[in-house]
Amino acid sequence: MTPRAGGTGGAPLDAEGRAIARAARMRRGMYILPSLFTAGSIGAGYFAITQTIDSLTAGGNVGGAKNLDWAAMAICFAIPFDALDGRIARMMNTTSEFGKELDSLADVITFGVAPCLLAWVWGFHSLPDTMNPELRRTILQIGSFVCFLYLLCGASRLARFNSSNNAQPRNPGRLDRKYFVGMPIPAAAGMIASTVHFCYGYAFPDRFWWLSVIWLAMVALLGFLMVSTWRFWSGKEINFSRRQPFQLLAVLAIVLFVLIRYSSGALFFVALVYMFSGIWARAAYSWSRRRRHSPEPEEIPHRTAPAFTESFLQQSPDVKEPDHELWHRGHTTLTEHPYAHESQQEYRAENDRDPRPDDY
């Protein structure tokens, strides 16, 4: 039976109509694929939140550290999902406002709430009870406020990213590369999660409680970097749809093996380098700009002999008058010179002779 467009009474579909209908069905299906990656990112964030809460009720330090380590790894695992959903949507030309808003909400949950709670529990709530109670309470209160600021800065960063159109950093970089304006929230969350994973979820020892102050400063720094206008490399100029050398597959396999086998150290190193890359780029730009705008030392003009003589005559008194003291002194010196009675040639020859003891 020949297929028809509107049931049995419609006109039969030709080959072009069937191709359009099949493309429409495929397009509806392709919208699901990037949304699945976004859903996986939300699931990883939800798992991280539950594991962080379970660490508060886990018995013993080992049990709580295991839960915190699982939470940190879940956040790190969500970063590739967040990077792939947008790239897949752009490659398949399936970007939409719905996917954009869903991705932002997923980022707030996975890279905002989950690392904020993880940073508070691991860095401040797990402080030893043996330290000064007043000091512990003060650090805990300040840490709670700083973690809230981190969450607020992350949400503001996402809102600015969605509302801005082709935003440019204050320190522009190379024209052939694309940059984020401010540190992206997945990278900030990765810095927190990789630090916890680097310590395998174990809290600070009793004698190293002061490390919580450094942790406090780092969380505050991450919040500042997110709302800053400094440039961070985005990697969007890398096009995986083009032909690549086959050796790249071996390189990617080695990188993936290192990240999985030595995840605690490798992830922490990558996150630390990425964070300081933005700081270094801003410092280098400020230094080069200050060097370009610094006033150059004034060059002293080269003065020829006539110009110098004219300047000297303008600034010095007129010594050509016979009544002037300088003229009288010079005339007396010349007339009383021991060789004044000789001719100029004899005087020059006498001066050119070798020095003798009688001359001294």
Image (cartoon, rainbow, N blue to C red):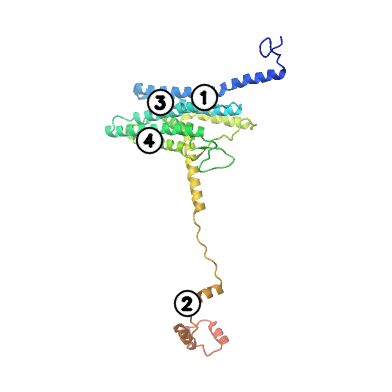
On the image, the x and y values in percent for residue 221 come to: 42, 38
Q: In the rendered image, which residue does mark 4 sit on? A: 216
Whichever of callouts 3 and 2 sits on the residue coming sooner in the sequence is 3
State the separation of the CA atoms marked 1 and 4: 30 Å
Residue at screen point 48% across, 23% down: 42
Specify few, some or many for label 1: CA neighbours under 10 Å numbering under 14, 14-19, or 20 or more: many
Q: Looking at the image, is mark 1 or mark 4 earlier in the sequence?
A: 1
In the image, farthest residue toward the front: 9
- Which of discs 4 and 2 lies nearer the camera? The answer is 2
Mark 3 Cα within 10 Å, few/some/many (few <14, many 20+)? many
Quadrant assignment, res 64: top left
Give amino acid for label 2: Ser
Q: Secondary structure at mark 3?
A: helix
Q: CA distance from mark 4 to mark 2?
A: 70 Å
The tag earlier along the polypeptide, 2 or 1, is 1
Q: How many marks?
A: 4
State which tag comes first along the sequence, 4 or 2: 4
> Which quadrant is the N terminus positioned in?
top right
Rendered position, 349 above or below 170: below
Task: Find disc 2 in the rendering and name its residue.
Answer: 316
**Residue 114: x percent and y percent?**
43, 27
As drawn, the label of residue 38 is 1
Residue beneath label 3, please? 68
Q: Nearer the viewer, mark 4 or mark 3?
A: 4
Helix or strand or loop: what does disc 1 sit on?
helix
Which mark's residue is nearer the viewer, 3 or 1? Answer: 1
**Residue drawn at 37 percent across, 35 percent down:** 216
